[in-house]
Amino acid sequence: MKPLLYILIGGCLLSGCSTAQMGTTDPHAVLTGAAVGGQLGGAIGGIIGDSQRDWHSGYRGSAIGTIVGTLAGAAIGGAISSSRQKEQATNGNAGADHTTTNGYQAALDGLRIRRIRFIDDSRDRILSPGESSKVVFDIVNEGSEAALNVIPSVSESSGNKRITISPSILVEQIKPGEGVKYTATVMAGKRLKQSSITLRLAITDEYGNEYDWHEFQIQTEEK
């Protein structure tokens, strides 16, 4: 019986058990799986054979169970080994993606905020309750590479909940030496109570990393 098992295991290693090829399968994993599967299959096969109340049936059942269990265990061991190697390869690709991300982020380091303007409806540079205003600024690429997927943002950083700001947009590309103008709408609620608010302008990437930012205060008129 044992020579037959070794022949079966060897055949499984050479053929890759129909699912895994040599070079992607660990032979030790196949042998370990075969051994465990053979023992379990033999035990189960013997029990089934014994249920026939014939020792010959029990012996044959054990032998058949050992063969089937060996093949199944070897296949499972090979599949697990192949899966682990694929996972390692995927992790290696993730490292390459990280390098690509670093290069992409480096291209955004040359972005700068320039020419900030605040324009309220009354043109008195005071934000009154219920009044709408605009924040306008330029984003200039002073680097040597094109910056991709640039996200300009405007937020209120003093915690005033009566201020509503238009959502950010995505700028697909800013070439070296060029720039874009960004405009955000800032709306004051009718129950605005603070004497001033703080607006924060920033340039971020799609991961939320900031590359340049400015803060300034706007006087508000209480009513």
Image: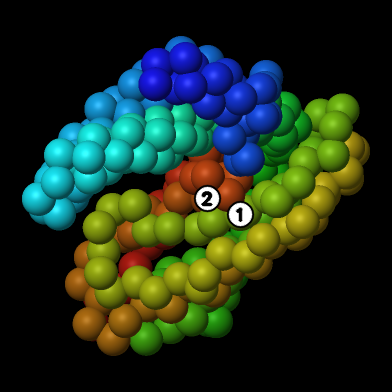
Checking the image for residue 201, the label placed there is 2
Q: Quadrant of residue 19?
A: top right
Relative to residue 173, is residue 92 depicted above or below? above
Which-is-in-front pick, marks 1 and 2? Answer: 1
Q: Which residue is mark 1?
A: 152
Q: Residue at x 45, y 71 (%)?
A: 165
Left or right: 75 in relation to 44: right
> Image height check: is 3 above or below 55?
above
- Count of marks placed on residues: 2
Helix, strand or loop at disc 2? strand
| N-terminal-most mark, 1 or 2 | 1
Asked whether disc 1 touches disc 2, contact meaning CB atoms under 8 Å apart, the reply is yes
Q: Position of residue 136 (x, y in %)?
A: 65, 62
Kind of residue at badge 1: Pro
C-alpha distance separating marks 1 and 2:
8 Å
> Which mark is on residue 185?
none
Tell me the residue at 39%/21% (across/down).
Answer: 1
In the displayed structure image, the side of residue 133 where residue 174 appears, left or right: right
